[in-house]
Image (cartoon, rainbow, N blue to C red):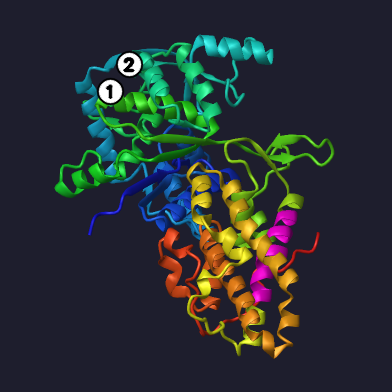
Amino acid sequence: MAQKPSFFITTPIYYVNAAPHLGTAYCTMLCDVQARFRRAAGYNVKFLTGMDEHGEKVAEAAAKHGMTPQEWCDSQAPLFKDLWRELEISNDDFIRTTEERQYHAVQYLWNRMKESGYLYKGSYDGWYCVPEETYFTENQVRKADEENHTEGQHLCPDCGRPLERVQEESYFFKLSAFQDRLLKLYDEHPDFVQPSFRMNEVRSFVEGGLQDLSVSRTSFDWGIPVPFDDKHVTYVWFDALLNYMTAVGYGVDTPEAKAELAYRWPAQYHVVGKDIIRFHCVIWPAMLMALGEPLPEHVFAHGFLTVRNAETGKAEKMSKSRGNAIAPQDVVDLLGVEGYRYYFMTDVIHGEDSAISFERMEQVYNADLANSWGNLVSRSLNMSAKYFDGKTPVLADGWEKKDNPLKAIAEGICGRYSEAMERFDYVGAKDVVMELVHAANHYIEDSAPWAVAKDPARAGELTGIIVSLLESIRIAAHLFEPFMPETSREVLLRLSMEDEADAELEEACQWGRLASDVPVTKGEALFPRLQHK
């Protein structure tokens, strides 16, 4: 049997200076939905996430808590892993940059980069933002000072916090040598950066001129040492970006590792926040070009989650100091895990900044999940159990070929849904499924099966109505699975079709696969309606 095509998708690896928050959960869930969809579509998926454990700010966080850096990192790992488990994240790997495999890969990178000719030793004298782990040129700092009217204070152009003046010996990566090659990449692969409007930001940055990048530090020691100069440790981004290749065998000289790297690399998608797009769309491809390695196919940059101020109506960045931060557990407590996943994945435009609110969460939950999807499942399974002795109807030969308004909507539904999913348009994909759900709810009202059931002469008509409803539910359950995996599994179980959970999506969405004369279970309400608090 031919090997399935690989689909390799990654989150950024998350800093361990604080517990996972709504933004990290959002990015991870974006990847999870895509990974689940691609598995269902027939791909062999590798979904990678993890923790970025080196660097100055990690060492500072550890010292603040009276721990060694390694002790601090070890204490943070369960926070991420436990939250991902609670949110039903289906990652295949969880990488930590303090692992032996990353240590080995980074040292291999150094030796390869030294051989490439794009590395040299010099001295760095400039501005550095510890929280952002980013170097800034004099021009960038001066421009930020002018825009913020803070001349002489020198605040970070990205986060607005004070910059440090760094003067130390350093190794430099010749990033400036890749300006033309990067611009050619953007010209030849306009979908390398997604959404498309993010490409403008990246292109503008590169066209403005690239400075060589300091890639080692000597002022602290919490990092992977440079193999040929142990006074230096690796600059955190030079370390962190490599995790994507480390996880698929980079630098390991065994047949198995080489086969894995050849199968998995390049990655199809790096999914990142818009704040780290330059690292992934400028520095990372330049590093790979220097090494002669293939480039990832796409970098998808999502926007920030903001909170709408109840008094002003304006969207504000979430922060503890503003008192408007929302923790993942707050949302789970309101919506449950499946409702959480549905809201953030189907009511947010993923390439843009999006304002969220508990009021909107409740509105979406009640309208889409309680009143529409949950109500359809409950009513339809209840009628099947009531009118057909607790089972699905006995299906007549050729029933799937008969014209039906729900069948008409289901024709080609997998294609329409997949087109949206492949471009990370989860809102559009949801709309495709909800069209079928809404139509099925209207179909109940229009066909009035409770009236049809009173006339024995219309038994065949009743069978057709219930079968069409159950078949619509079965298809919708498959399409909703990336968003609400446990709910979809439960719906298929209530239809006695749990064995179909692993069917490939296109086949599963074909009209006519409903099981005949098998038990149905109404069960408890999938999404009890929320009462406004």
Image label count: 2
Mark number, residue 290: 1
**SS state under label 1:** helix
Q: Quadrant of the C terminus?
A: bottom right
Residue at 33 percent of width and 13 percent of height: 177
Q: With 513 as the anchor, is 532 left or right in this view?
A: right
Disc 1 marks which amino acid? Ala
| Magenta span: chief secondary structure | helix
State which region is magenta: 362-380
Position in image of residue 157 (x %, y %): 58, 20
**In this view, 67 is above or below 147:** below
**In this view, 113 is above or below 373:** above
Disc 2: which residue: 174
Disc 2 marks which amino acid? Lys
Q: Nearer the viewer, residue 305 or 368?
A: 368
**In this view, 327 is above or below 166:** below
Position in image of residue 20 (x %, y %): 54, 47
Residue 195 seen: yes
> Are the residues at dot 1 and dot 2 in contact (C-beta closer than 8 Å)?
yes
Position in image of residue 405 (x %, y %): 63, 64
- Residue 368 among magenta residues: yes
**SS state under label 2:** loop
Residue at 74 percent of width and 50 percent of height: 360
Dot 1, how many residues are within 10 Å of its Cα: few (below 14), some (14-19), or many (20+)? Answer: many
Position in image of residue 493 (x %, y %): 51, 76
Which quadrant would residue 178 be assigned to in this image? top left
**In this view, 148 is above or below 261:** above
Q: Nearer the viewer, residue 19 or 312?
A: 312
- Residue 254 among magenta residues: no
Residue at 42 percent of width and 35 percent of height: 298
